[in-house]
Image (tube, rainbow, N blue to C red):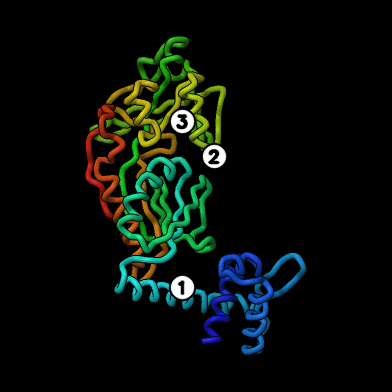
Amino acid sequence: MDRLRMIHYFVETVRRGGFSRAGRELGLTPASISRQVSQLEDSLGLRLLNRTTRQLSLTEAGELFYERVSHVVEDLAEADEIVQSLHGGPSGLLRVTAPASFGRLHIVPALAGFLETYPQIRLDLVFTDRLVHMLDEKIDVAIRITAAPDASLIGRRLARQHSIVCLATSYAEKRGAPRRIEDLAKHNCLTYGASGGSTWRFYDGESDREVAQIEVSGNVHARDGDSIYVATLAGIGISLQPIWRVAEDLKAGRLKPLFPGTWASSIGGASAIHAYYVHRRHLAPKIKAFVDYLADAYRSPPYWENGVDVGLRPRKARRRTE
């Protein structure tokens, strides 16, 4: 048992990048963690970590040892959760990451019902627009919006995502509204994303067939969609926005959709909202409970499209596993 505890502390030290961070995770002092790792090294007769005043790094032996035992520690924790769930249902800490805007708008509102259904689960939410490495940051579920599913992970499609081009009434009053897709070239189009997103592709809402492609430009570009969303509401320009972000503004008339019957993309092709988790032989009950709950909450077509008539046909959500 002592050996398993020492291995656990060693794995946490490597994952967290130091004794202090591992100690915070485990509720122990850095000195206590360091002492346990040193005892593990003594018992093995090998140095696992190179220690300096500024950082820790794995020795060659440490890399080999970590590669072998990290999965063992993970499997033991998972097995413990599965056995515990037989008595009181899904339980334990669940770490979830998602894009910041989507998490705030469509995950947090679902949490009250989820936690009432599964009171033994605790949530640690990591809402950020950066790509989170699930293993390094011990993420259980990653909600991602992508057109290209991650083949290295197990994924389930939760809902479709469609984006549309929209503008504020104040912009239309000053500059007019484009009547045809080609007219966008004459307007101030706001873009976001790391790649610029200056090529907008349009697709028929019934067949999903590409019907147009246009280069757009404007006086504001941002790395995050929220900034462009706010700029659009302020009447600065026209933008491409996911329906899940602007649904309430469309219903209230704060934003007007352009080109009904089409959806658009700046990355090419349809994207969808997926839940990803690391491949495991047995899916932890807390993960399954969370993913199932979101899938039921979003439905098909997703609830945020209710009352938003932009001419898009309903489609059934699909499950995807590998």
| Three-letter code, disc 3 | Thr
Q: Which residue in the structure is indicated by mark 3?
A: 199
Helix, strand or loop for disc 2? loop
Relative vertical location of residue 109 with respect to residue 38 in this rendering, above or below = above
Q: Which residue in the structure is indicated by mark 1?
A: 74
Q: Which residue in the structure is indicated by mark 2?
A: 194
Relative vertical location of residue 34 with respect to residue 119 in this rendering, above or below = below
| Three-letter code, disc 2 | Ala
Helix, strand or loop for disc 3? strand
Please name which of the two marks, 1 or 3, marks the residue nearer to the observer.
1
Q: Position of residue 240 (x, y in %)?
A: 42, 29
Who's the residue at 66% across and 88% down the image? 42
Relative vertical location of residue 166 with respect to residue 296 in this rendering, above or below = above
What whole-number distance in Å separates the C-alpha atoms at marks 1 and 3?
44 Å
Residue 221 visible in the snapshot: yes
What whole-number distance in Å separates the C-alpha atoms at marks 3 and 2?
13 Å
Residue 233: image tag: none
**Looking at the image, which residue sits at the far right?**
53
Q: Earlier in the sequence, mark 1 or mark 2?
A: 1
Q: Earlier in the sequence, mark 3 or mark 2?
A: 2
Who's the residue at 29% across and 56% down the image? 292
Image-quadrant location for residue 219: top right
What whole-number distance in Å separates the C-alpha atoms at marks 1 and 2?
34 Å
> Where's the C terminus, which quadrant?
bottom left
Question: Do the residues bearing badges 1 and 3 touch, measured as CB atoms within 8 Å?
Answer: no
Relative vertical location of residue 181 with respect to residue 294 in this rendering, above or below = above
Helix, strand or loop for disc 1? helix
